[in-house]
Amino acid sequence: MPEPYDDGAIAGTGAGGAMDLAASEATTLERTPGGPQGTGPAEKPRSLWSDAWRDLRRNPVFIISSLVILFLVVISLWPSLIASGNPLQCDLAKAQEGSQPGHPFGYNGQGCDVYTRTVYGARTSVTVGVCTTLGVALFGSFVGGLAGFFGGGWDALLSRVTDIFFGIPVVLGGLVFLSVVTSSTVWPVIGFMILLGWPQIARIARGSVITAKQNDYVQAARALGASNSRMLLRHIAPNAVAPVIVVATIALGTYIALEATLSYLGVGLKPPTVSWGIDISAASQYIRNAPHMLLWPAGALAITVLAFIMLGDAVRDALDPKLR
Amino acid sequence: MLLEVRDLQVEFKTRDGVAKAVNGVNYSVEAGETLAVLGESGSGKSVTAQAVMGILDMPPGRIAGGEILFQGRDLLKLKEDERRKIRGSEMAMIFQDALSSLNPVLSVGEQLSEMFTVHRGMSRKDGKAKAVELMDRVRIPAAKERVGQYPHQFSGGMRQRIMIAMAMALEPSLIIADEPTTALDVTVQAQVMDLLAELQRELNMGLILITHDLGVVADVADKIAAMYAGRIVEQAPVHEIYKAPAHPYTKGLLESIPRLDQKGQELYAIKGLPPNLMHIPPGCAFNPRCPMAQDICRSEVPPLFDVAPDRQSACFFWKETLDG
């Protein structure tokens, strides 16, 4: 990503080379067409990314969603900041009891504190969401990027492999693959979701690499002796990465929801891991007697997913020059 | 001889058949010499240049025959890796639209210094100093301040200067300029052309100037090669061709230049359209549009006749054309 370049260079040039023939052109400096309207005296040179950042900073949707996400990240790193109890310390005698002093969300079916478990559940969800998204984005862009750049036979082969993985139904696949896994960590679930999630990114990366590849500056770089890897990494990738970032951010929310779905079905995470999906699953049979056991983890899940999807939406708007 | 193209043939595979874009082109350029390649859109002038540079998209393109001798070596026999080393350092290309030929996410300084860091193994710091030096050399005012700016912050003429600077960076012995001034407005065109001609003289480079602008040609070119339907129809020193063209096509081109003394009259135009490259007419490709066409033109392909030393015409009636 280019670093923003900051000084009054534009104002300086017109006056600087006055005696030069070329100066007549310097005075005709254009502003980017379609850029945001007047931005005060400090005219900074702008790139796609600095433009996007300016847009984002003013977007309330972005501010709210990133505050929520920041909060989630903080409590998943240090849950004891706001929850003093132990999520695995349960007292069966208090099972299904409602809200009471010191335990605002009440107790669940096993007599564990719902508040503590909801706070600790964030860690699982954020870990699963972030790791899956990273894995999917890296692997998907790698495969899609190669397919788009080299084209021809490679493209055909890689695209068909992508299609095969795209065709696996998520829930059915989850039931089949994950039911044989005995590990109680989050990694098998993350691995499975990467396995099913990468084709989505691969397709987008392929398309955007093909578009970027046809740009004149790629041809120009080639004419000036750039190698394949140089063209791909320096000239194509930075110009093709925006759609991948957008889709990955939106998908992050859905991966968190998918983990909850799989856990609800009993094939995702397994106790003693603390996860919203597990708690929702356990609480769903008591919804008539003790709805609080379901509503708190389900509400936390809904807000988290919403925050990531809203963030993705804001990023998409900021990176799409046509919406300016 | 710096560059000699011998009997070059290029085809493109399309859905409807094989399009013969270049059908036996011969031309040569010496150090310090400027060859202008003239012709309508689709006459094969850019494709020939791309074949020389080795940036033809293959497939669908294919070099069906011929030789490209550069400093005595046949480029078509070199490996891709060796050709890449020649591109940029020994021969370079300037494109029509400088805005789309520069990478929008990299500052111009980064793109210029890349020539030195990649090809010459310089450090980033030295590369940047060289970039400023180059920008000074192509007379961009306040080069030091502007080296960190992005392409969209420069005016059209300045951008083309940057493209010229990139092409000149490693002092290649051959430069191909593919309509370098077409995208610029008229006042800037002359400045950019002057700059190009001046740098060419300074570095004693060979220059192939691809254009359809006869006004540009007259001032800077040493000799002209007029192309039609993938063949060279007339090749001559620049003054002789303006004085008396020896091919009806060149004659038509020259007559269609608007002239001050013909005020009020309708502009001359060559009737008809260039042929479809998949169905080039038998005989002389120009015969359906030629006012002088006879039976022989419809059955036999005219060879290149020697009109004078270093002057050829591919017309059976070159004598009549020259006199009339």
Image (tube, rainbow, N blue to C red):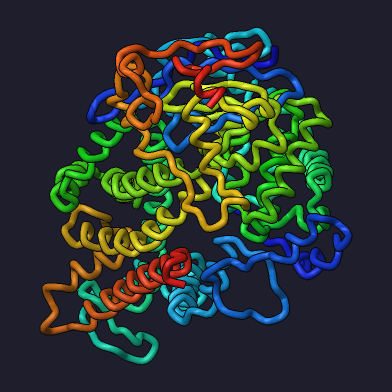
Left or right: A175, with B283 as reference point:
left
Q: Residue at (31%, 24%) from the top-left corner?
A: B280
Q: Residue at (66%, 59%) from the top-left corner?
A: B155
* For residue B282, above or below residue A134: above
Residue B158 visible in this rendered orientation of the protein: yes
Res A168 quadrant in image: top left
Q: Residue at (55%, 68%) from the top-left corner?
A: A33
> Who is closer to the viewer here, A43 or A197?
A43
Q: Residue at (66%, 11%) from the top-left corner?
A: B309
Residue B59 visible in this rendered orientation of the protein: no
Left or right: B7, with A207 as reference point:
right
* Place of residue A52 in the rendered image (x, y in percent of width and height, measured from the top left): 53, 67
* For residue A82, above or below residue B227: below
* Place of residue B63 in the rendered image (x, y in percent of width and height, measured from the top left): 43, 17
Name, please, the residue furthest toward the front.
Answer: B324
> Who is closer to the viewer here, B247 or A262?
B247
* For residue A27, above or below residue B121: below
Name, please, the residue furthest toward the right.
Answer: A19
> Who is closer to the viewer here, B59 or A203?
B59
* Place of residue B98 in the rendered image (x, y in percent of width and height, measured from the top left): 60, 48
* Place of residue B128 in the rendered image (x, y in percent of width and height, measured from the top left): 79, 44
